[in-house]
Image (tube, helix red, strand yellow):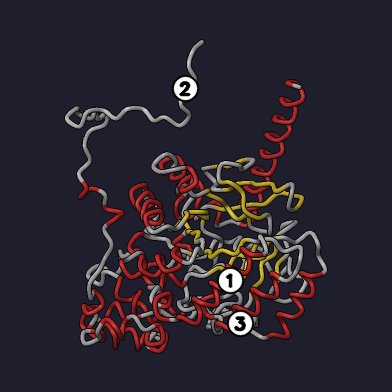
Amino acid sequence: MEPLKTIGRTAPSPPRDEPVVHLKPPVDPATLTYRQLRDGPFWQRIPAYRAIDEATFLDHGWQARNSITSPQKLLAALQDLVPASFHDDVAQGFARAPMAIRVSPYLLSLIDWDDPYGDPLRRQFVPVASRLLPDHPKLTLDSLHEQADAPVPGLTHRYPDKALFLALDTCPVYCRFCTRSYAVGVDTDEVEKVSLKATEDRWARAFRYIGERPELEDIVVSGGDSYQLKARQLSLIGDTLLDIDHIRRIRFATKGPAVMPMKLLTDDEWVDALTRVVEKGRRLHKEVVLHTHFNHPDEITAITRRGLDRLHERGVIVRNQAVLQRGVNDTIDTMQTLVKRLGYCNVQPYYVYVHDLVKGVEDLRTTVQTAVDLEKAVRGVTAGFQTPTFVCDAPGGGGKRVVHSFEHYDRDTGVSVWTAPSVKPGFFLYFDPIDTLAPAYQARWAVPAEQDEMIAQAIAAARAQMAATAHASSVRR
């Protein structure tokens, strides 16, 4: 009879002097650039911050009080780093922008002011008139129809089991590409904002609606920005939602870690409030996570990693939602580096959005094809769960559609057609930037009748493709 084998016995180790066989060529650690994070007093390059020590710069209150809120303050901070012509370009840019200016000293310090026109962070936050392009003729202010799907002010209920709760209308920094430029920030010359103030009376109406909808399980708390909530307010929102039995998941959405990471290091009250809500959720077997918004690897510094490490130590899960932008992250190398750097800092890349149809930022939008190509290049560079899903948030309220899932996409006219059968009936259309099209098609977009014809042709092609697919499926069955 064969003797029983010992359970759990490990394989013998090879002799210590036996060489390990490497099937891949050696990697020079210096090439792992995603691990190389900016450190040291980099902010002291800005004239206004030359005398600012680390303790002051890491004070989130100092960052908020000294944020740039006008072209004049920008010039005062930069002084001789930029020529007067650039300042004039910025002043004219903000006069035409749907978003007010608000830039933290931290973010201002990360911009390469030797190349302000080409810098990817400047492009996101500081508009210059000379680079602006005309809006697409089919663009609307609230292109995602969030207000149309709002049963009470500041609460969008589009997906069957999920709602978006816009708790407030302010942010630590204002992104010029904000999809909620209809509400976020103060009124501008271009846009009179919808009011979504952080009032508990308005919140109570939202909580009452959520409590009366047993199908709701998932609430995104956004705005504006959850970073701007006081610790007491964050606790109130978190506790109220967790106490609703059918709520299973809460996501606090914030761009804060990308633009003011020192808050995670120096605002103990806010971090403690978030931690308590996360821990309460865990005790109730519910998930509470933080969703953040990094778009470029340069937004992640050693300060960022320290702040994110603090959340990681407390068991706070952090996921990232990026926006694909021209001249910011639309190259393979940049997107791969962003994904790898996020993973290095324990942030899970979750979504990359095709840029929404937003007023005043046509220069930032890319084609759908750009997203398709980048997704192929990113997939496989790291683990699958660390690979973001590239999506188009279908204009008109169709919701997030995987970028490959269009029913039809005409690369010449730039019209893509989407359906969302589990969200809403009908067709949803996205439009590539006109300046990326061939001259003949740019000319067609200048004629309203031609616009209608191109759209009608795209929808007809989508119908035909869907019919052909349905027929093929029935034949196979």
Residue visible at 68% across and 44% down in the picture:
459
Amino acid type, callout 2 = Lys
The earlier-in-sequence mark between 1 and 2 is 2
Label of residue 5 in the image: 2
Which corner quadrant holds the C terminus?
top right
Instruction: Check if mark 1's residue and mark 2's residue have beta carbons within 8 Å.
Output: no
Residue visible at 22% across and 33% down in the picture:
25
Q: CA distance from mark 1 to mark 2?
A: 65 Å
Place residue 56 in its image quadrant: bottom left
- Helix, strand or loop at disc 2? loop
What residue is disc 3 on? 233
Residue 242 relative to residue 119: left or right: right
Residue visible at 22% across and 70% down in the picture:
114
What residue is disc 1 on? 180
- Helix, strand or loop at disc 3? helix
Residue 24, position as x, y percentages in the image:
26, 31
Query: Which of the two discs, 2 and 3, sits closer to the camera?
Result: 2
